[in-house]
Image: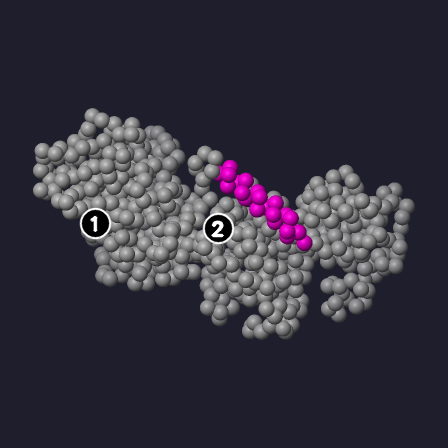
Amino acid sequence: MKSSNNKKHLLTGNEAAAEAAILAGCRHYYGYPITPQNELINHMAIRMPQVGGTFLQAESEIAAVYMAYGGAAAGARVMTSSSGPGISLMQEGISYLAGSELPCVIVNVQRGGPGLGDISPSQADYFQAVKGGGHGDYHNIVLAPASVQEIADLVYDAFDLADRYRNPVMLLGDAQLGQMMEPVEFRKTPRTHQAVKRWALTGAEGRARNIVKSFYPVKGELEAFNIRLQRKYRAIEQEEVRYEEVNTQGAEIILVAYGTCARICKEAIRRASGTGLQIGLLRPITLWPFPKEPLRRLAKKARAFCVVEMSAGQMVEDVRLAVLDRCPVHFYGRMGGGVPSSREILKKVLNILAPEGTLELEIPEIPTELGKGLYFSTIP
Amino acid sequence: MQALYSAPETLIRTPSHYCPGCGHGIAHRLLAEIIDEWGIRGKTIGLAPVGCSVLAYNYLDIDMCEAAHGRPPAIATGIKRVHPDNVVFTYQGDGDLAAIGMAEIVHAASRAENITVIFINNAIYGMTNGQLAPTTLLNQRTTTTPEGRNPLTHGYPIRICELLATLEGASFLARTSLSSPKDVLQTKEALKKGFKTQIEKKGFSLIEVLAPCPVYWRMSPVESLKFIEEKMTQTFPLGVFKDWEKTVSAPGGQATKV
Amino acid sequence: MARVSIDVGFCKGCELCIPFCPHDSLTMSRHLNEHGLPTVYFKEDHPCSGCRYCAVMCPEAAIEIFK
């Protein structure tokens, strides 16, 4: 594929992530095959040599993340990608990236777990993405796209954020987002600016040496470093929260969902329009930092929240922490590759509004414009 | 007065954290000497492992990166692919390289990754109080093999040079020792050959250095040199196992002398 | 004649230099250094051919040789 800009391409989410990375100036990609992210590694294998970059299939996810670590330490824009089991293997390296303050973009195309699980869409890696995942007190910046276009847009931003904060950034997708095809337009000029990395390892010609490390054995040094890291995280929480609100004005029930689940919630809202049900959606785009303030604001007006996830309930914990007991927080989830339907979500909403089952609703069939391309991405 | 010998400039003048008689100090000094003699301080990037030499970056005045346990070859790969004209080396112990990092070292060698690996083999885990290493000799006592290494329960020592010699990607493989001035000087020559291999873009080079760990071998530093000569070299014969400039006999078997 | 200079601040008294001196010119001192470690000293009245074996074996780079 020629990366001509200002033109629509029909791509899988995985391919869009790869292509956007190249446009963002990433010239070093290290990966290991695992379904459902194989289109990404395959695309990189074709494209990187075309742009004079490095593509390397590592011997394991562990080696892949450390090759990315090396590239980042050397001052380059680097990416690696994987899915659930592979991300689990990478967690050691991600902790080291955070501890050495190295910018790196990691794409996690989530699949069902635990263990080998399956290769269906899942959101059960939320904890290992936003809560650290590896050892020590650290955070990844976690971005959650909900369409192929947004994958491309957020990959640009991921590189910028990684460079600006010298921090690993994880793009958290799932099997559905990674493998489905949608039209995508790459930004004419990516808003990327590669920072001058004076700390990078380039050979100490004419300057004092640089050391990249996360080891602070002298008593007190490590705590001081951690305090500095936490200050950085507070700054990120101040500056980088992103979310989308849909129909929240006057909504009785606020759905909270990200990624694939947010798309399905939008369909549920659309199907409920005209029925008298007032449903809104808050879609976190950054899972860390988490949009706590907007949730607190909505908690003042809404009757209840309903968190929808493809997991046993992971993000719901952060929603509850955000709103505390100001507003009831309900949960609807499917696990192990199960994907909630909009009908299931609406049933859950009815159940929240009338637990005794007195409220019934004729849920309209899915509108006929399904398949015309616009249905999933916009709410009329 | 003219100095016949003084410490290399690249070696940072600070007392080391190593135990008396430890081989790491000698190996660090040899590296610093070569970097000085060849004037490559400004283009050399080193990787420190996890193990006793985790603080190697405190002693070498070059750009350095600390690595997770066993991962230096993967990180070196990432650095070298960004800076192909720099000299990139990893410095690893036997636990780092031959236990937890076995996959990384084998694959870096098989990719003919153009890096140099300095493999310090002292047949023991020094940093964690002297446990069994993959290169611990049969019958050798360690804190986790108090009765000596028994092959029935702990298997056999791994010979890294012989193992990597089967890979087409490995261009220079040598095993040397630090047990006498002659051996130390041969080690320096082998290290130079490793860097030369990389600078001339001939692919992967590894120098396995048999080094003393007197404290966890429970003997005096001078006795530990004798242990290397009399015991270690029986299991780990010295020599060149692979050389891109000339054919050497019998990889994996009897090696030719350096 | 050459002579050996030992930086006692670096010497840890491992003795690796002693057996390789062809003139038996190095020996252990009775004094501890500032870190409380035993150190080696050069017997000033002994010869030194400047072979550098002691410096080659020293793990602490504590030895300098002058001529």
Give B156 or A372, whichever is nearer the viewer. Answer: A372
Residue A353 percent location from the top left of the image: 85, 46
Please say if B100 is above or below C31. Answer: below
The amino acid on which the numbered mark 2 sits, given as a three-letter code, is: Ile
Answer with left or right where residue A250 lies relative to residue A240: right
* Farthest-out residue, top: C30
Report the residue at 60% width, 72% height from top. Answer: A5
**Is the residue marked by circle 2 packed among few (<14), some (14-19), or many (20+) residues within 10 Å?**
many
Label 2, label 1: how far apart the Cα atoms are: 35 Å
Residue C46 percent location from the top left of the image: 9, 35
Residue A188 percent location from the top left of the image: 61, 70
> Which quarter of the image is occupied by the N terminus of chain B?
top left
Question: For the residue labelled by badge 2, is the local secondary structure a helix, a strand or a loop?
Answer: helix
Question: Which residue corresponds to mark 2?
Answer: A62
Report the residue at 82% width, 59% height from top. Answer: A271
Give A310 or C61, whichever is nearer the viewer. Answer: C61
